[in-house]
Amino acid sequence: MSGWSHRHILDLASFSLEDYSSVLELAHRFRSMPVTGARKLPALQGRLVATLFFEPSTRTRSSFELAARRLSADVQSFTPASSSLSKGETLLDTARTYVAMGADVLVVRHSSTSVPEQLACALDRSGERTAVLNGGDGLHSHPSQGLLDLYTLAHHFDPDHPLPEALQDKRIVIVGDVLHSRVARSNLWALTACGADVVLCGPPSLVPQDFVAFVEAPPPGQAHDPVQHRGCVEVVRTLEEALPGADAVMTLRLQKERMHQHLLTDLNRFHRDYGLTHERLKLCGKPVPLLHPGPVNRGVELGGSLLDDHSISLVEEQVRNGIPIRMALLYLMAAVDSSPDPSLAAIG
Ligand code: NCD
């Protein structure tokens, strides 16, 4: 953990294998501890975590807030509808209000790409020490979801050592609306970094062919890729091509609120071609787990009975793992400078 160098967490493209290991290791320690209301960890006592969600959220926001409370941080949540945004205040001024109240971490979600990054730059420029954690921006990035998906898969493949190595040479299939999914983009960086091969499956309107090159170059503004050898990315059009040999399958919601054109006319047809069912999953040739970041549209990207089948569905497990993963991120961002940290001994 001594090598942790990310002041802000905006995108997984800048994560090294050591970074993934640090987060997964710490999350596993948090997850293995019985935590009750009376047994909160003191690691973030006196720290303030503010959640600024300018877009709806059920899982991400609640789990960041729970994670912060389990580490004894104070939590302030911002709700756009009842805020001064409606009186014309800018987003930056809103964020600065929480900084002035002493926020150590701002968890920011916004429907526009790069809002968390712009906030982080503005705070850095003005010499603030507040760190920004991206809770999902536009189509771009959702690092905490990518990391909790990574942990869930690593734990499935190797429950005793849920570390990046558990993903080496696995074939992970992601089905559906990849184009509008920040979750898929974060998963592409995380999974390929850990040596998994990712197969993207969907129609050209939702899975453009150029996704095969997605992880081949670091994003603009980043000098180099911190990962030396990545797994491959493949794009296929049918489940019959994608599923044979899969080790895990992730499906995605059709994110209509992020579609600027009407890309799909017929939901029944999408379900027929790409909807996952018990029958369809037999194409994998062995029992494989199913993941979904939620929210799920039952009967569209998957048959409802699959979601309720806990021998296959890891969806609730993903939600559960979101808490220790977010505890790990908040810990690394806000408690790291108090090292050597007595509270770490408490979780050892
Ligand atoms: C995702 C998101 O917001 O990008 N949900 C989540 O955070 N669990 C996926 C989605 O909206 O479909």
Image (spheres, rainbow, N blue to C red):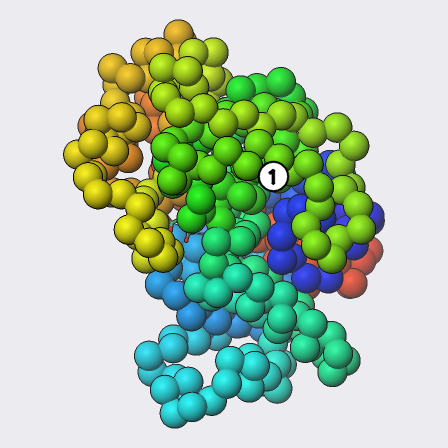
Q: Quadrant of residue 151?
A: top right
Q: Quadrant of residue 71?
A: bottom right
Q: Quadrant of residue 278?
A: top left
Q: Nearer the viewer, residue 243 or 241?
A: 241
Query: Which residue is pictured at 80% across the width and 58% down the height?
Result: 339
Residue 299: x %, y % from top left: 19, 35
Residue 266: x %, y % from top left: 19, 39
Query: Which residue is pictured at 73% across the width and 62% down the height?
Result: 7
Q: Nearer the viewer, residue 167 or 72?
A: 167
Drawn side of residue 297 relative to residue 155, left or right: left
Question: Dot 1, crowdedness within 10 Å: few (<14), some or many (≥20)?
Answer: some
Helix or strand or loop: what does disc 1 sit on?
loop
Residue 304: x %, y % from top left: 20, 32
Query: Which residue is pictured at 33% across the width and 43% down the height?
Result: 253
Q: Is mark 1 within 8 Å of ligand 1?
A: no
Query: Which residue is pictured at 75% across the width and 36% down the height?
Result: 227
Drawn side of residue 11 relative to residue 57, left or right: right
Residue 185: x %, y % from top left: 54, 43
Query: Residue at label 1?
Result: 214
Q: Is residue 320 visible?
A: no
